[in-house]
Image (cartoon, grey):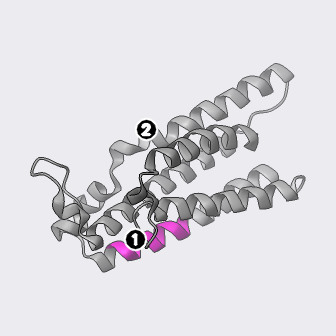
Amino acid sequence: MTNWIQAARLRTLPLSISGIIIGSFTARWRLLSEGSKWDWQIFALAMLVTILYQILSNFANDYGDGVKGTDRLRTENAEIRMVASGKISAQKMKSAVIITAGLSLLATIALIYKAFIPNYLPEFFIFLGLGILCILAAIGYTIGKNSYGYMGLGDVMVFIFFGIVSVGGSYFLF
């Protein structure tokens, strides 16, 4: 279990939730000034979704770099990666990526259902597409032939998904 906790890289979670906190509480401030209701369930689901996306990204990164051999080049003092070190097999990590992607999708559907159904059906489908895009981005950082992490696009994607999507998306949910 300790190896899985290490692979989840819990130290990365504060970054992932920061955008949700900013967007959600900005929406709360707006709603309270309008005399409208702010929904804690939407906030809690948004936090769960972003945590699952981050863990998915971390598992996918460990798997992708592990099977490509990139993590073998890490320095002696660097954080140990589970697949490269052999502490978790590539097959088990691949299964964890698939399971976490599925859980991420289910949590995304629960969130956008709570936020948009029955009154905002078009927004539901827009956010479903956005959620699927987030899942694909989390996986595509180091997995696949055209992994954007190896093209130097990691920082751009962090800005897009931890900035614009996280803050703007969570604001819009309310």
Q: Residue at point 25% right, 64% down?
A: 70
**Closer to the camera in the image, 2 or 63:** 63
Q: Residues within 10 Å of mark 1 (few under 14, many from 20)?
A: some
**Amino acid beneath label 2:** Pro
In the image, the segment drawn in magenta is 93-103
When asked about the image quadrant of residue 28, the answer is top right
Q: Residue at point 45% right, 44% down?
A: 155
Q: Is residue 45 left or right of residue 65?
A: right
Q: Residues within 10 Å of mark 2 (few under 14, many from 20)?
A: few
Secondary structure type for disc 2: helix
Residue holding disc 1? 96
Q: Is residue 35 above or below residue 144?
A: above
- The answer to if 36 sits in the magenta stretch is no
Q: Is residue 69 above or below residue 110?
A: below
Kindly report the secondary structure that dominates the magenta region of the rendered protein: helix
Separation (CA) of disc 2 from disc 1? 22 Å
Q: Residue at point 17% right, 55% down?
A: 74
**Amino acid beneath label 1:** Ala
Res. 14 mark: 2
The spot of residue 76 in percent (x, y) is 9, 51
**Residue found at the very far left of the displayed protein:** 76
Quadrant, the N terminus: bottom left
Visible in this render: residue 117?
A: no
Q: Is residue 94 above or below residue 25?
A: below
**Closer to the camera in the image, 114 or 121:** 121
Q: Is residue 27 left or right of residue 136?
A: right
Which numbered disc, 2 or 1, marks the residue that appears first in the sequence? 2
The spot of residue 32 in percent (x, y) is 78, 23
The spot of residue 79 in percent (x, y) is 20, 50
